[in-house]
Image: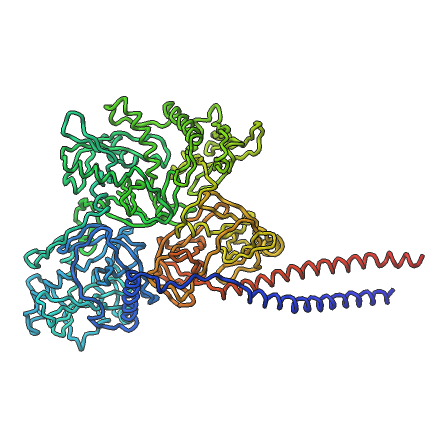
Amino acid sequence: MNIFRINKKNYLLISINLLILIVCAFYYFNYKQTLISATDNILVKYANSNNDIINKEKKNKYTIIKDIQNKLKKIFDNSQINNNIFPKIKKYDFHKGETVYGFTLDINDNIKPFQEGIISEEYEQNQSNDLSISIKGKNNKIFFNEEGEFIGISYPKQSQKMEINYIIPSNSIYNFCQIVNKHYIFLSQNNLNTEYENNIYLPIYDSDSYNLYDDCESSTDEDNNISDSEISKTSEIRKLIPLEIESETNNPKQNIKLLIKLNKNGKFNGLIQIIDNKYIDFTDPFFKFFKLNYIDENAIKEPKKPPYPETFIENISKITFSIEFTNFLGSGFIYKIEQIPNTNNYKYYILTNTHVLLPAEKENAKIKIYNSYFNSHKDAEIFTIIDNSEGFDDIGILTFTDNNHKKYKEIKKILKTAFPDKFIKPEIQQTVYSMGSQESFKSENLFFPKSNEQQTRSIKRNLLKKGDITQLNEAIISFNIEIDHGNSGGPVFDEKGQIIGMNRNTINNPIATDNFSHAINILHIQKRLEEIFSQHQNNPKNIKTITSLNSEKHKNYLMQKITNFKQNFNNLEINQDQETPNIIFSIDELTDLTNKNPISFPLLKNYPNKSKIKLKIKLVYNYHQQQIILIDPQKEYIELYADIDNKNKSKINLKIIRKNKNNKIIDLLQYSLDNHHYLSNKDSAFISLKFIDLTKTSIHTTKQKIMDSLIVWHQDNQISGNGIIFNKVKTQDNQYIYYVLSTYEEESDNILVNLYNFLFKRLLQDKNEIIIYNSDQEIYKKEEGTIHNIFPNENNLILMTFKSSENYPVVPFKKTSDLRVGEDIYYLTNLDNYDHNPQMFKSQISSIINKNSNFVFDSVFNLKDKIKNINFICFDNEGNFIGINFFKNSNINIPENFIQAKLISDIHLKKLFKNSIFKENLNILISVTFIFMLMIIISFKLYPIILEYNKL
């Protein structure tokens, strides 16, 4: 028996050693050969270099941006003081919408990232107050125009309550220095240290003895409590920006040389002028001069103002009004005008938000409106207010009268452009502008606060902001402009001057990426206005009536819309240009309509040429939109129900029943939705029904290509990600194997959960559901994917594959050597990977840190304050993939409102392929080991039986 035990142990030891030998041999020969084959045959499609086809204008832009950035870096690196480093300072007439270049004066990392913004207001050459700029973030910046000329620098203190940036414009510096030059140029060196008539002492220093970096902080900065011991510590990081102003005498020898002082945080801290080799600190006089609105016109000769061209921005400004009463401020715009019968007066209808008018309606306050084109405050009356609680029905109307026939004709002409007969639908990532009024920022209070000073209300009207559409649906448009208090009710319009929406609110929601703004879609507004004006037709004198959309009349109106919706389909002539019918219902409306009976969409007439028409039902809720179902309207029909949950009044139950010709239930879908009456933001969910033509094709824009290229996937409720297809191979059965580069996101921080995900989700059960969007057919398609990496790489990326008969597009990579600072890029994120509902943003390359490694782009986000990790996939302006950010690996010294991203190339893909091959072999080894161990166990179990049998 002892011999048997020894033999048994030897047998087990030999078996294990044999297994290890087989495993090593298998791994060496199979893995190595597979690895060589895979890395040799990896195919990444690179976009052709576009160096030769970049137009002259863009090349000039890139050159100017690169030149300014390099000069600023040189100043901060070497403390270079050379007054010829930038073009001479001039004064300008600034106009709304003009492009400006901003460079963040960061101290920690000398990358001087670039941003693009616009002028927000009209500003004349001889003005001396602040200038409003619309640009992302509140970083301290220096500004240039498109010609590369200096135009201003950020206020040292910005209002955190406003999104508008305020700058000290070059006009103020120019005008001040010319006055200083006239007053002091004749003085000799012996009396420069005199106390002058304005009783301001000017510190004067010899050029040889003055330590430019060791002067005490001016009282204008918030960090002015610096002790003598601290001055030496901070002196290393204070900077001076050299500038030069051409003398009005046209004598180059009398050109004005000056230095802009920056404090230890890189913020503006005053002016130093160089006169006769003396450094004269004019900080205090400049700030006192700067609080003036206009300079003394006798001191500076005013140049002729160039004619302002008629533009869409000027036209929209003519129809946009500030709305003022008691302590409230809002905005609105003219939507409709008509001549009052039998008079020479004209009635104007102004659209705004309900929440702007409700306080006035409750207080019976007198409403004043103002617009510079009409050049006076006018009395306005409330025409109507929608009283329901739907967020997208935040619509009110004011009216006022005027008798100026010339203005009437001009406004009528503008409205034809603002609301054209053939409306061009907005698209994601389309450039848009927002206009509205807000209280101004008091510069005099910033620099010279007075404890007993009474605050007077000052309003900046029709300030302009520029951004891009990030998401949109039938009722709401989201854009990356954070509107300020007073902007509500103002117009949102495109570059053709077409109004596409009305400012409503700013989103600050934990499931949203960051603070964005909502506009009510003008198409939705127009549908509501049709109903409102029809209700008032029979009672035109019924002013201040609050329009109810929960009435029986409204229900009848909705039922008529349903009838028209069906008729429009039956009468539809299929062609590529015609828009297919659609209809939307808010959940409140569905609850009212289906109180007794469901809404039914029965079978439609059977037309052969409509066999490719499908009915798509979409649910939009909490900033998400989800395709619920796609049916054949000639073979199937649906019934819709919505009711308030009896047990939980904060929930609404939505039920969709799908039936066939024989009235047999095919599918039953149920959703439990938040009752928006219990939500702080009052945003209701709604159902959209739209007929989709599957044969319809469209010309793909870059934005559509990028949206279509996004792959969204999830695995249970723990793991998800989004990525791109970078390669595909056609198989013998006429299908395709697709290779996907994707982000990897785990919902849990629990170690045990992550270990489970590693062992089962990524190693053994590696299947997932992929969602892909087709913009031609406006539908989502689902595929089954496979994860091919055990661990994500250092950039949180993994490799996946899936097989499909569909022909999906492959995304080309951009060569890192082709990137330029100032180049437009797009970046996407998909917050909920159970739905394909990405947010898309536009930016520019702000700085390239390493040509083969990292780049920085500007953003509306301040991700340093974000707990959640957010991945962005980046594309160039032609839809080529360039890289991805990963928040955990971001450089902490990157300035706020900038994101650092990693340039991705075939080198990174080869590493992922190696990892994936290791996983495949590991799976085989685990399977072989399991089978081998099972055989050993069976052998040991059978051995006593066989031994006993032989004894018999």
Q: Position of residue 197 (x, y in %)?
A: 6, 62
Q: Nearer the viewer, residue 494 or 9?
A: 494
Q: Nearer the viewer, residue 743 or 389?
A: 743
View extreme (right): residue: 952
Q: Position of residue 217 (x, y in %)?
A: 23, 65
Q: How is the image coloured?
A: rainbow
* Quarter residue 355 falls in: top left
Q: Position of residue 658 (x, y in %)?
A: 54, 32
934 horizontally vs 79: left or right? right
Image quarter where the C terminus lies is: bottom right
Residue at the location (21% across, 39% down)?
Answer: 413
View extreme (front): residue: 608
Image quarter where the N terminus lies is: bottom right
Answer whether residue 330 is visible to the viewer in this image: no
Residue at the location (7% across, 59% down)?
Answer: 299
Q: Is residue 759 above or below residue 424?
A: below
Q: How many marks?
A: 0
Q: Position of residue 264 (x, y in %)?
A: 28, 65
Q: Nearer the viewer, residue 65 or 238?
A: 65
140 horizontally vs 630: left or right? left
* Quarter residue 849 falls in: bottom left
Answer whether residue 525 is visible to the viewer in this image: yes
480 horizontally vs 778: left or right? left
* Quarter residue 115 falls in: bottom left
Residue at the location (49% across, 48% down)?
Answer: 772
